[in-house]
Image (cartoon, helix red, strand yellow):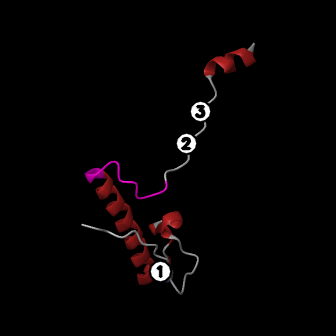
Amino acid sequence: MKIRARKFDGRCSRHKRYNPAVDGPGAIRGACPRCSLLFEIWEASLRLNKLIRGFNPNHDDLERPMEKAPAVDPRQMSLIGD
Ligand SMILES: [Zn+2]
């Protein structure tokens, strides 16, 4: 089975600034069907990614987020306190 990763650049012509990933369902104006569909597509893509990862945890379907810098060592904090 092969699923192609695709970049979907959908946009509502009436609400060009609506971005489901950022704005969420609460930002859909007047129950706009196009915006609602965009949100559903976004949700479905998240679900698809989750399902694929559940099936194969090593599947790398997204760029991995940068590793966070290690938190400040608490021992150093106590030194500063002195
Ligand atoms: Zn819209």
Packing grade of label 1 (10 A; few <14, some 14-19, many >=20) is few
Residue contact at pointers 2 and 3, CB within 8 angstroms: no
User: Which region is colored magenta?
Assistant: 54-63
Mark positioned earlier in the residue sequence (1 or 3): 1
Packing grade of label 2 (10 A; few <14, some 14-19, many >=20) is few
> What mark, if any, has residue 30 been given in the picture?
1
Compared with 28, 63 (above or below) is: above
Residue 51, quarter of the rendered image: bottom left
> Residue at the location (35% across, 48% down)?
58
Q: Determine if the C-beta at disc 3 is less than 8 A from ligand 1.
A: no
Question: To which residue does mark 2 refer?
Answer: 67
Kind of residue at badge 2:
Glu
Q: CA distance from mark 2 to mark 3?
A: 9 Å
Q: CA distance from mark 1 to mark 3?
A: 44 Å
Secondary structure beneath label 1: helix
Provide residue 60's location: percent of width, then percent of height: 40, 54
> Residue at the location (45% across, 68% down)?
25
Question: To which residue does mark 3 refer?
Answer: 70
- The foreground one among 25 and 11 is 11
Provide residue 62's location: percent of width, then percent of height: 45, 58
Foreground tag (2 vs 1): 2
Residue contact at pointers 2 and 1, CB within 8 angstroms: no
Kind of residue at badge 1:
Gly
Residue farthest to the top, as pictured: 82
Q: Indicate yes or no whether the magenta region holds residue 50.
A: no
